[in-house]
Amino acid sequence: MRRAMLPLFLLMTGIPATVPAQSTAAPPIAVIPRPAKVTPHAGRFTLTARTVISTDTRSAGLGRQLARYLEPATGYTLPVRRGAVSGNRIVLRHDASLKRLGDEGYALEVRPGVVTVRAPAAAGLFYGIQTIRQLLPPEILREAPMRGVAWTMPAVAIEDRPRFKWRGAHLDVVRHFMPKEFVKKYIDLLALQKMNSFHWHLTDDQGWRLEIRKYPRLTSVGGWRKETLVGAYTSDTAKQVFDHEAHGGFYTQQDVREIVAYARARFVNVVPEIEMPGHAQAAIAAYPWLGNAGDSVAVWTIWGVSQNILNPSDSTVHFMQDVLTDVMELFPGPYIHVGGDEAPKTQWKSTPRVQERMRALGLTNEDALQSWFIRQMDDFLTARGRRMIGWDEILEGGLAPHAAVMSWRGTSGGIEAARAGHDVVMAPGSHTYFDQYQSLDHTHEPLAIGGFLPLDTVYSYDPLPTELEPRFAKHVLGAQGQVWTEYIRGPKNVEYMAYPRMAALAEVLWTPLGRKDYADFRSRLVAHLARLDALDVNYRRPAPLPGQPQAGGR
Ligand code: TNX
């Protein structure tokens, strides 16, 4: 019944994209995000079966990665050799003299016969490789051999480095579970666009998706919900219709190790999110003593903000710290996200045990109690060399200086946090919530949560708020795009909501402010959409700009 409500084209999942015609409208250097400095030259480089990849000792692994990227579509198994080689070649070299380009910057020279990528660090070489993938025809990204394509790139000199260091994308795998293989594809796309942070929303009211060894019920019970609300949310229970289908799934620790290693090989850091004290009903369903209500609750089957939140007892604190112990073992990155958003205090107010606890801790209100709870996690993580990050509500009631803040309720939380000396990741709903509609005409769009966030609005975003005093700017690490999946039921729908908006955000985060230009982005997007076609990404075709032909290969 619920499926019948969707436009037909969304049901056509799994159908491979048609081979795009070689784009004619795209400019020759159609790289997204736009590089900091581009100097075109005459001539072209041609990749052949005899091209050799030449590396230094440290970049041998990246050389093999480049060879693996190029092999499926070309059918060439390019040799990777250490040291100097002659003939048609792609050269990867660490170069300390390019320190000014920073840890992620690179210099790329494409000349007839020779391509050279130089960078002061491995991440820069990796990004140079991503640029090479984009300078070649879009078909290079296909998984099957492509006959009759000339594998050439325009001669050019590029010097490039990112504007922001946190270039992120979030994915909610709770409201709808996303298979491991898709998570990898999602990460691959981020890397192609030089994004480097994947925020994995793993727990919430509607499910717990991460295996924790000590607490198996988190996944055996918390990993599944009985059914799911159909259609748009209504608070009128008489009008709520359910699909009567169990929904769930979780990632084993082995799955997580695999994904983290996969991301790491693509210079993407994985930030796991374990929600507390709110958005935790699935954990309470698995272990009812974590809650306040006494009687057991089920994994939630509707959307919104649940009243069931964790109790602030010592045993609950220890339980969540145990969870974080497994999380730290699985996720080696510096940041651990503890949620902290939307924790209604109704139950804490009406539960005598919680009120007693509050008084015993010398706290005057429930916000201070939440702050205390979060502090227990911060101390725990900080003592183990990690950094806590949470949604901007963690600012309310005070926050340890080391903690970082993700600003979602507009940018004011982020500004306040930066002024107070906290590092901040901007994630305002107004510009970075990709669960919103991409058109005002909803009749041709899949059901979404609401709102309207078109491509040009995403592109217009500047993570550095004009009202923030320059001396605090260093605290703005960057921004990220959110994909909440209440109304996004699977991979193809995720792609539809995330693309091409994620490509616009990638440019917001990488390209120097002075080089941002929406019309120019749109002309490069033509080639980029052909890349997404080659990768079988179910993007939403953007509305044509006035006076321009329809973009995209489909
Ligand atoms: C608010 S943003 C939430 C999520 C929802 C989202 C829907 C945030 C920290 N919490 O639980 O999925 O809105 O847009």
Image (spheres, grey):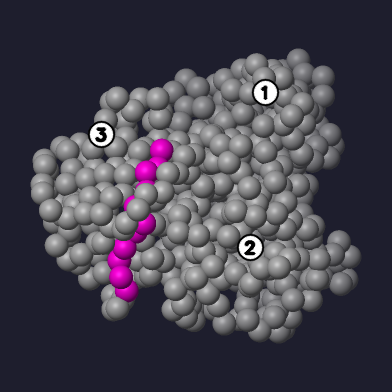
Left or right of residue 434, residue 185 in this image: left
Q: Does mark 1 have its CB less than 8 Å from ligand 1?
A: no
**Disc 2 within 8 angstroms of ligand 1 (CB):** no
- Please state the total of marks drawn on the protein image: 3
Point out the frontmost of discs 1 and 3.
Answer: 3
Crowdedness near tag 3: few (<14), some (14–19) or many (≥20) residues, C-alpha within 10 Å: many
Please report the residue visible at 68 percent of the width from the left and 50 percent of the height from the top: 458
**Residue holding disc 3:** 94
Secondary-structure class at tag 2: helix
Circle 1 residues within 10 Å: few <14, some 14–19, many ≥20: many
- Residue visible at 78% across and 58% down in the picture: 452
Mark 3 within 8 Å of ligand 1, using the beta carbon: no
Q: Which residue is label 1 attached to? A: 418
Q: Main secondary structure of the magenta part?
A: strand
User: What percent of the width, then of the height, locates residue 238?
Assistant: 88, 71
Q: Residue 497: which numbered mark, if any? A: 2
**The N terminus lies in quadrant:** bottom right
User: Circles 1 and 3: CB distance less than 8 Å?
Assistant: no
Per the model, the C-alpha gap separating discs 3 and 2 is 38 Å
Residue type highlighted by circle 3: His
Q: Residue at x 32, y 35 (%)?
A: 119
Find the magenta span and give its range: 149-159
Q: Which mark sits nearer the N-terminus, 3 or 2?
A: 3
The Cα–Cα distance between marks 2 and 1, rounded to whole angstroms, is 30 Å
Q: Nearer the viewer, residue 228 or 177?
A: 177
Depth check, mark 3 against mark 2: the one in front is 3
Residue 22 rendering spot, x and y as whole percentages: 44, 73
Q: Quadrant of the C terminus?
A: bottom right
Find the distance from the CA under tag 1 to the CA under tag 3: 35 Å
